[in-house]
Image (cartoon, rainbow, N blue to C red):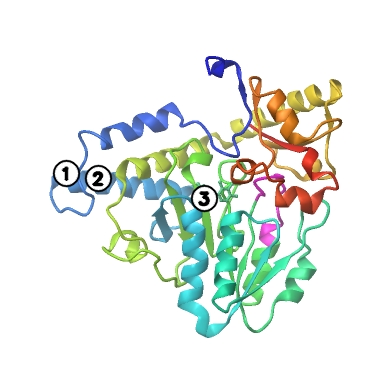
Amino acid sequence: MENNNLIAYWDNAASTMVDKRVLESMLPYFSELYGNSSSSHHYGSIAKSAIDEARENVSNLINAQTKEIIFTSGATESINLALKGFIEENFESGNHIITVKSEHKAVLESCEYLEKRGISVTYLDVDENGHISLNDLKESITSRTILIAIMYVNNEVGVIQPIKEIGQIAKENSVAFFCDATQAIGKINVDVIEDNIDMLAFSGHKIYGPKGIGVLYKRNGISIAPLIHGGNQEFSLRAGTSNTPLIVGIGKASLLAKNEIHVRQENAIKKRIEIIEHFINNEIGILPKWEKFQIPNILNIELISCNSIDFMNSQIYKMAISNGSACNSGLFEVSHVFRLLSKRPENIIRISF
Ligand SMILES: *Cc1c(COP(=O)(O)O)cnc(C)c1O
């Protein structure tokens, strides 16, 4: 463990460091500014203003309105709220969801849960580059379809889906469109109006903010039922005393993401070139086919003579990388997304910076 500082941290798709400016913005709300934002006294109103400002920063980042932003405990909760909450509120208009085989487990498991309760789900295939076919999507829509759930950027292979086109198809067919944008936020411009997104989820700790806080954007006019009942916090869609410091943190992280996105993109492109050179020049691995469709900060390498687990073990004091999403690699299970895209999924690693 004393070598910690020498290890290259290349697993930013699993979690990022809290930016110092984010941490500083949060600190007073743990200590002297501890009021409950629902209280009507001075302490309460200080917390409430801080939350209002955070909501403003989050909504500016994705071109939404403040009343369309719901704070949750993370992307996982936002995804659960969007999918289960939408179905519960709208099942009288239909019972069919369309999603994709390469989605995050939070989406796939929520869909499986809903299937057990009588909802039918279509899982679209992806091609060898990780993209869905827009034609398949159109053909899967029936008169019973009420929701499409497709992620912006895949967390394991970094491939960007044609979100604007998907949003357009959803709109033309009067189907709601939910997008897990956890890996896109802060990396590429996300605009819920331009992309025709009705609901969108992301997490604080993937954008240099704290863990345990996330956002669900829900377009005005889309109805969902809450998962957590109680007080009227978060427009009565997520009860419980607001977590002021974490909300302030994701607000600050959103502000920084908006202001610094171009610098981050440039840095990622430079870093990507360096890392690719390291792996190619030392004949450790080759680039997979889908490399040209990846977001700059996520890179996969197909190892030439070693599987991902042996390689990760051999590099354990040199680089922090992964062989899929954090949930998969804990179990040393080969990623379901690598399996969809590659003939040698056990040789693929993910590097994210
Ligand atoms: C990290 C991640 C999530 C889950 O976020 P949590 O903060 O763990 O709830 C969901 N989707 C994608 C694409 C992710 O990368």
86 and 326: which is toward the camera: 326
User: What residue does disc 3 label?
Assistant: 202
User: What residue does disc 1 label?
Assistant: 43
At label 2, the amino acid type is Ala
Distance between mark 2 and mark 3 Cα atoms: 23 Å
Q: Is residue 203 above or below residue 164?
A: above
Measuring 22% from the left and 43% from the top, which residue is drawn there?
Answer: 46
201 and 122: which is toward the camera: 122
Q: Indicate the position of residue 163 as horizontal and vertical percent values.
A: 67, 58
Q: Earlier in the sequence, mark 1 or mark 3?
A: 1
Q: Could you tell me if residue 216 is visible in this image?
A: yes
User: What residue does disc 2 label?
Assistant: 47
Mark 2 residue CB less than 8 A from any atom of ligand 1: no
154 and 135: which is toward the camera: 154
Q: Is residue 65 left or right of residue 98?
A: left
Q: Badge 2, how many Cα within 10 Å: few under 14, some, many 20+?
A: many
At label 1, the amino acid type is Tyr
Q: Mark 2 or mark 3, which is nearer to you? A: 3
Predominant secondary structure in magenta?
Answer: loop
Q: Is residue 130 left or right of residue 326?
A: right
Distance between mark 1 and mark 2 Cα atoms: 7 Å
Please provide the residue range marked out in magenta.
153-164
Mark 1 and mark 2 residues within 8 Å of each other at the beta carbon:
yes
Instruction: Indicate the secondary structure of the residue bearing disc 1.
Output: helix
Q: Indicate the position of residue 313 as horizontal and vertical percent values.
A: 69, 27
At label 3, the amino acid type is Phe
